[in-house]
Amino acid sequence: MKLKRVVKRATANMPGVQAEVKQAWVDARRLGERAMFAVSGPPAPSTAILLASSGRSGSTWLGDMLAAAPGVQQIFEPLDPRNAEQYRRLMAWPPGLTSSAFKRQYLRPNADAPQWAAFWEDVLRGRVRTYLTDYSRTSFFPRRFLIKTIRANMMLGFVARNFGPGQVFLMRHPAAVVNSMFHRVRAPWPADVRDLLAQEALVADYLRPWVSELERVSNAFEALAVWWAVENRVALDQLQNTPHYLIFYEWLSLRPRQEISELTRWLQMPEDAVPDTLLHRYSRTTSKKQRQRPGEDVMVRLSAWQRELSAEEQRIVQTWVERMAIPWYGEDVLPSASSGARGVK
């Protein structure tokens, strides 16, 4: 990691050189992978692990834990528009639109979308790779890929139907997610409800009863609440009757060893795949402010949104949770699910 920082600083004023150096870094660290795949071929898409969630739900933390398993190479956010030109074209991503923007695609599980199928095959076979996707080299000779993404919630059924990877879906309380996206960043994540209403199939399948309410959404906070509710409703529906594992951020935070052991067992990983040191380590996307409170009680941290959001903001989040009929999350901090996780074979 120190060498990366040295290279970044040395080439800070030379963007062309920096891009070449970064690409050379990725290529050098993939030599073992390429040599192995030249003999045995890359892992099949069905062997991949697809870790999906809304942003700010803890997926970086969980992804780093799962990537500690032997033979697993994490591919970090291959649907980030900075990492895939093919994805930018499919999304018609405008120049200058930031990578954090809430521009997400809805696909019906049975959609006839050969271009999307081709893209997802590239992702699951490990062909969409950049300096950012491979920032952490977790296996020199990978036998399976871990695809970590916050932009696939409304395509999970399509991916399952066409490729059948092991799907892990992570959920966190929507009030905590929206609070993180809106209040705990320098600028709120740029969600726009018009990007939902512009998708005819999504409107027909999910949004028709709420079109008039959605058209009246005018502030960034409510837009984030809407987006969370819609993309999680779609994800839960598309995962029904599909092999997947649902895990809750709150239970993972409160009893990490139990939760991660059950998940790795479902993924057929070794029991000791995740070392204890990773269970309580801060995610690399955790803010510096949070890192300065290492001794903070877990429940105090999980309930921060109750203190930091106004009563009106909490009402807005809960309104859209109820409209989209999202189970498990309400006014309480913890999910109402009696167990910490649910696996479906």
Image (cartoon, helix red, strand yellow):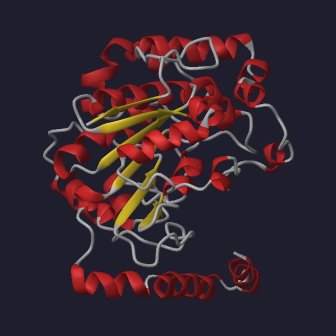
Q: Quadrant of the C terminus?
A: top left
Residue located at (60% from left, 29% from top): 250
Determine if residue 302 is in view: yes
Q: Is residue 217 left or right of residue 144?
A: right
The front one of 2 and 225 is 2
The front one of 331 and 44 is 44
Residue located at (37% from left, 63% from top): 145
Determine if residue 97 is in view: no
How many marks overall?
A: 0
Task: Residue at the far front: name it.
Answer: 271
* Residue 72 figure quarter: bottom left
- Percent position of residue 5, x then y: 73, 77
Q: Is residue 121 left or right of residue 217?
A: left
Check the image and report above or below for 124 versus 25.
above
The front one of 270 and 303 is 270
Q: Is residue 54 left or right of residue 293?
A: left
Check the image and report above or below for 150 versus 300.
below
Residue located at (46% from left, 53% from top): 148
Residue located at (60% from left, 20% from top): 334
- Percent position of residue 221, x then y: 63, 27
Check the image and report above or below for 97 versus 111.
below
* Residue 124 figure quarter: bottom left
* Residue 195 figure quarter: top left
- Percent position of residue 298, x then y: 74, 31
- Percent position of residue 141, x then y: 40, 77
Q: Is residue 238 left or right of residue 250?
A: left
The front one of 85 and 340 is 340
Q: Quadrant of the N terminus?
A: bottom right
